[in-house]
Image (cartoon, helix red, strand yellow):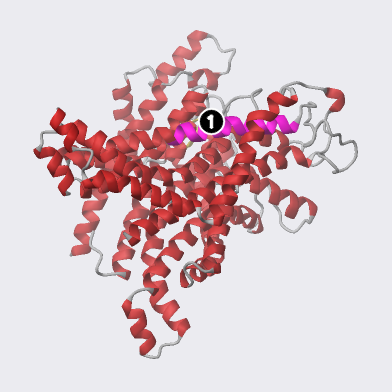
Amino acid sequence: MFVLKFLIRRLFQGAIIVFLVSALIFTLLRVVPGDPVRLMAGGMAPEALIEQIAEEMGLRDPIPVQFARYMGGVVQGDLGQSFVRPANGASVGGASFDDSTRGERAKVLGLIAETAPMTIQLALLAMVFALVIAIPIGVAGGLAPGRWPDRMALYLSSIFVSLPNFWLGIVLALLLSVKLQLLPAIGYQNFSYTILPAFVLAIEMAPFIIRTLTVSVAGVMAQSFIDIARVRGLSRNRIVFHHGMKNAAVPLLNLLGVQFSMLLGGVLVVEFIFDYPGLGLLTINAVMQRDFPLIQGIAIVTAAAFVLINIVVDLAATTIDPRLDY
Amino acid sequence: MTAIDIAIPPAPGAGEARTVASRIWRMAFSSIEFRIGLVVFVLLFLAAALYPELSGIDPTKMNIRGKLMPPLFMGEGWSWAHPLGTDQLGRDMLSRTLVGLRYSLLIGVTTTVLMLAVGALIGMLSGYYGKRVDMVLMRLTDAQLAIPMIILAITILGVSRPTIPAIILVLGLAGWPVYARVMRSTVMSERKKEYVRGAMVLGATDMRIMFTLLLPLVLPPMAFVAVLDIARMMIFESVLGFIGLGVQPPTPTFGNIIADGRKYIMNAWWIATMPGVFLFLTLTSINLMGASLERARNAVYGGA
């Protein structure tokens, strides 16, 4: 019952947030200079044709009217069509002879659905790498506050946060892919193409995990129940991994919710460097091509993902630590 | 008026404030990490401030005959005139990198100050007045945190012209909510204390309490931690430059130099890598200082 009430309340709040984000990005895209129709029809197209296309697409209506029409579609699960991408290039087996500039255009939802799994795969592998890197460093630091493992954690996280992701990506691609030929870097053909981008993302995420772990492990180990566990004769490993990690799990989960937007920024850049065909690359291309419906669609989907992830995080946190109340 | 002037300075909280800030400062300064960071930072800062002018090398001057020269001792054709080599158009890499560092620092520091100012103001109003003001401002903060700011940022800069003020504004508006939250919770707990209530009884205006009594007390500890954000914003600026949405060429920035150098990575690895080394060193020095300040703050607050 409690969970149901919680879900209804949070989903309602989430819907408001997604609505606000949509309104904001929609308005923003319409007040900035630059006519997307000019881009679609080509620089040489006569003014009359531009006006005609814009009229047909409803781009000359007042902004609130356009927004209402757009949201009407969104509610029914229709995020509109891309301005520039042809449907045949993006959908499987669509052998049409349509003129891509004025024919069938790709569905925004379809484009997002195609690329999202790639990004999820990248993000999950990056998280695994980040945890593998961060847990030993963070836990060691937390167990020895003020001593050298703690110092080491500080130095390593300062170094990790100082590595600009795009530069690290280029350097690693040069070393591991070009010079040593260990890993493929550019594009995507099979799973091995995910490893290098995921590693770069992991280095970006690791410092936050290290810091959270150091603080929460140090905090837990200072609690009286740890001393009691020692008196009870539990082994050091058991104390650290059973009690220590369990208490560090909640701050870590919260970190995931809070750092979602940072992860998103990292994904964008890393996919761009490695030409990895995910949501991030799609976003950058959409911005470069002024593909307004696609930008809107991505913004709405990511805002919704943020809301959902935070709900899941809070639910998981209450499951781990029943004292929490949201 | 005069009564308040006499009443406020000896307030116990205000005296404590200076000691808390200076205790944090002294504690951080005594750590080895902070000193390493400071020395490296000062060296890089001086190089960026002086070298381009003193050497008289114009970072945008092309010299096709001297193009793609490697850095010192790295392969054939290097020269003392170009310690970091030259790029595909024969421009001096060292002065390009250092001018890039200037823009990076300028944007990083200005953006952080803007974020801190906006966040502190909103947090102060929210924490001091509470109730309805607080509710509206905090919902605004929530919404802001949920917006995929990176998408918003590249959209704004992508469809308009990325000028320096636009970049600062976009980045600054993206980062304030965190400061607003910290400020709000500190002010909420401070304003219940004796010295604030005393000032109210003596008839001090809200403005006076907020900005002459509370602000000097709660801002310095927050500002110390903001040092870390300078580095974060510098990375952000370089990312924007790298995807072509930062300060535009011919002005050299870390982002656009590295993006350019990537095309020549096979036969001139130094163009993309060397500026990155400088950026990395600058960021590490700032992060070491910031991390020691943060630790010192946590230690002072935890111990006090």
- Residue A318 rendering spot, x and y as whole percentages: 28, 66
- Residue B284 rendering spot, x and y as whole percentages: 58, 48
- Residue A88 rendering spot, x and y as whole percentages: 57, 37
What is the chief secondary structure element of the magenta stretch?
helix
Identify which residue, A138 or B195, lies in the foreground: B195
| Residue B97: in magenta span | yes
Q: Tell me: B286 left or right of B210.
A: right
Q: Residue at x 49, y 14 (%)?
A: A50
Query: The N terminus of chain B lies in which quarter of the figure?
Result: top left
Question: The residue tagged with tag 1: helix, strand or loop?
Answer: helix
Q: Residue at x 18, y 65 (%)?
A: A1
| Residue B200: in magenta span | no
| Residue found farthest to the right | B76
Identify which residue, B133 or B120, lies in the foreground: B120
Q: Please, which chain is the residue tagged with disc 1 on?
A: B
Identify which residue, B212 or A324, lies in the foreground: B212
Q: Residue at x 43, y 55 (%)?
A: B296
Q: Tell me: A316 left or right of B103.
A: left
Q: Within 10 Å of the Cα at label 1, are there few (<14), some (14-19), or many (20+) other Cα atoms?
A: some
Whether residue B146 can be seen here? no
Look at the picture and state if A41 lies above or below B74: above
Quarter of the image where one finds residue A272: top right
Identify which residue, A133 or B293, lies in the foreground: B293
Query: The C terminus of chain B lies in which quarter of the figure?
Result: bottom left
Quarter of the image where one finds residue B174: top left
Look at the picture and state if A258 lies above or below B161: below
Q: Which residues are magenta?
A: B93-112
- Residue B19 rendering spot, x and y as whole percentages: 34, 49
Residue located beneath label 1 in the image: B106
Look at the picture and state if B249 lies above or below B276: above
Q: What amino acid type should be assigned to the residue bearing mark 1? A: Leu
